[in-house]
Image (cartoon, rainbow, N blue to C red):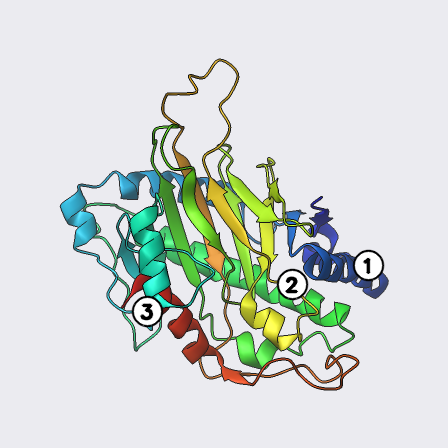
Amino acid sequence: MLNTIDLSSNLSGASSPEQDRVVAQAFVDAASQVGFAYVTGWESVVPAELVQEVFEYNERFFDLPQEKKDELEYVSSKANRGYLSFGREQASLSKDPNQIESEREASRDQKETFEIGNDSDPQYPEHWPKEEDLPGFKATMNRFHQLCDQLHLRLMSLLAISLSLPPDFFLPQINGRNHCLRLLHYPPVPRKGSNNRIGAHTDFGTTTLLWQDDTGGLEIEGPNGAWVPVKPKPGTFVVNFGDILARWSNDRLKSTVHRAVLPPPDSGDDEGGMTKTRRSIAYFCNPNPDALISCIPGLEGPSGKAKYEPVVAGDFYAAMLEAEIGV
């Protein structure tokens, strides 16, 4: 169901304008039909060994004593930084705080996360662990954050081309690196309990770049409403498209519902035993906080009218996060 898009020629600068248009069309096809795709050929921008290093730090961070993680507590959805312990966030399709709290009580998301923003942001400081606790963590995460932004800018340029827009159409409103790097840890849990690791939801921003380990469990809602596994594939990350991009494109580009569930047992596993640990790295891309998101001219559709009122990106994103986290 998910296509694989190869960026190697485009990112190396060896592609022709016609080749770029072909790759761009593959992106818009994925964004308008499924909302998800596998991506290969990204290593010239984000080295594979750096991704492996980030996964190793993912493990080392969540292995820290609980009191050290709690010192880095997430305190503000506007800042969107810091440590979220088990049950703090409840991913949901609802934006009603009471409904979300009911979901939290019924089946808490089985994950802990650490959110990292743009370290040069003067308004919102990062919640870095002490250097002696995790030597090199800050430098590695900052480098990864910066390189993922470069990759995001190239993807958004391709999306612009695919919509018959100038390649730099989005640039003035996405050039502030207002993105969230999220480390996720799903610990082993009993298979006989809740199947939920993170509930059904959509992402809020423009695009999400997701690297996942080999455990599995990610699923997307297919066109017929059935859940479709997005199995890990070596050498790929998964890209999906978020609510702001859907609003911007008047739903030409699809923000797809997805979730993480317990992976099926491997051959020989005890079906009543414990699952494997799952780790993933998500890079949530967002417009600049002051960007006004209104329908791209020409995408109003047959009615000639946009489906959504204009919104300020930062206000929209913070309101969505606050509904799920509560601060």
Marked residue nearer the N-terminal end (1 or 2)? 1
Dot 1: element: helix
Residue 162: mark = none
| Residue 265 visible in the snapshot | yes
Using the numbered discs, state the Cα–Cα distance from disc 1 to disc 2 in whole angstroms: 19 Å
Mark 1 vs mark 3: in front: 3
Image quadrant in which you'd find residue 59: top left
Using the numbered discs, state the Cα–Cα distance from disc 3 to disc 2 in whole angstroms: 25 Å
Q: Which residue is mark 1?
A: 22
Q: Which residue is mark 3?
A: 77
Name the residue type under label 1: Val
Vertical order, 107 against 176 (above or below): above
Extreme-left residue of the structure? 67
- Which residue is rendered at x = 38% and y = 32% of the image? 277
In which quadrant is the N terminus drawn?
A: top right
Indicate left or right for 22 with 47 as reference.
right
Dot 3: element: loop
| Residue 112 visible in the snapshot | no
Q: Mark 3 and mark 2 in contact? Answer it, CB < 8 Å.
A: no
Dot 2: element: loop
Indicate left or right for 216 with 95 as reference.
right
Q: Residues within 10 Å of mark 2 (few under 14, many from 20)?
A: many
Marked residue nearer the N-terminal end (3 or 2)? 3
Q: Residues within 10 Å of mark 3 (few under 14, many from 20)?
A: some
Q: Residues within 10 Å of mark 1 (few under 14, many from 20)?
A: some
Name the residue type under label 3: Ser
Residue 254: mark = 2
